[in-house]
Image (cartoon, rainbow, N blue to C red):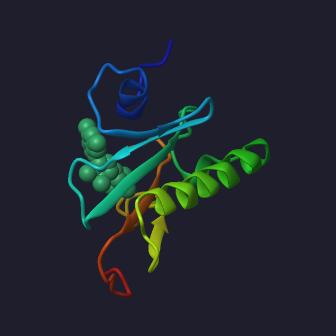
């Protein structure tokens, strides 16, 4: 069996996290190094390495991640807006090879991100 990813270990409670949402398809927890007052990662339970590895069957799952992000944004009171980001690959500065949607907000964000 393949070794669990860091985020699978978090999903299974083997690594502690500040979990804010869970269902049968995804989890969401606070980023350990937040870049804003609210910085949450929405992570599918399926260990898809990156956006580049998505297949047609994942279409519904990815839509679900965005709807969960929207729901958490409302729960967190991000009424003035927020940002969602999938980093992908080396130049996209992805550091954890398990697909995750960043939900960032709670301050004025700048553009472009850099
Ligand atoms: P990436 O750089 O791959 O887009 O995002 C990975 C994110 O995971 C980073 O923002 C990093 O701070 C976060 N992260 C890495 N290890 C842990 C951990 O053990 N716990 C939590 N809560 N976040 C983590």
- Is residue 51 positioned above or below 111 on the image? above
At 23% from the left and 47% from the top, the residue drawn is: 32
Going by the image, does 60 lie left or right of 95?
right
Work out which residue is located at the far right of the displayed protein and give it: 56
Residue 18 image-quadrant placement:
top left
Where's residue 100, x and y in %? 47, 49
Front residue of 51/19: it is: 19
At 28% from the left and 25% from the top, the residue drawn is: 15
At 34% from the left and 62% from the top, the residue drawn is: 93
Dividing the image into 4 quarters, which one contains the C terminus?
bottom left
Residue 93 appears in the picture as rendered:
yes
Where's residue 89, x and y in %? 44, 57
At 42% from the left and 66% from the top, the residue drawn is: 77
Where's residue 24, x and y in %? 62, 29
- Is residue 62 positioned above or below 20 on the image? below
Going by the image, does 63 lie left or right of 12?
right
Residue 95 appears in the picture as rendered:
no
Work out which residue is located at the far left of the displayed protein and give it: 33
């Amino acid at each position: 069996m393949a070794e669990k990813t860091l985020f699978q270990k978090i999903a299974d409670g083997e690594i502690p996290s500040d979990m804010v949402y869970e269902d049968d398809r995804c989890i969401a927890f606070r980023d350990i190094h937040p870049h804003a007052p609210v910085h949450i990662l929405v992570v599918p339970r399926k260990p898809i390495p990156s956006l580049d590895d998505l297949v047609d069957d994942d279409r519904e799952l990815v839509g679900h991640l965005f709807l969960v992000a929207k729901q958490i944004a409302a729960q967190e009171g991000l009424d003035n807006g927020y940002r969602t980001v999938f980093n992908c690959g080396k130049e996209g500065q992805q550091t954890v090879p398990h697909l995750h949607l960043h939900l960032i907000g709670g301050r004025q964000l700048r553009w472009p991100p850099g």
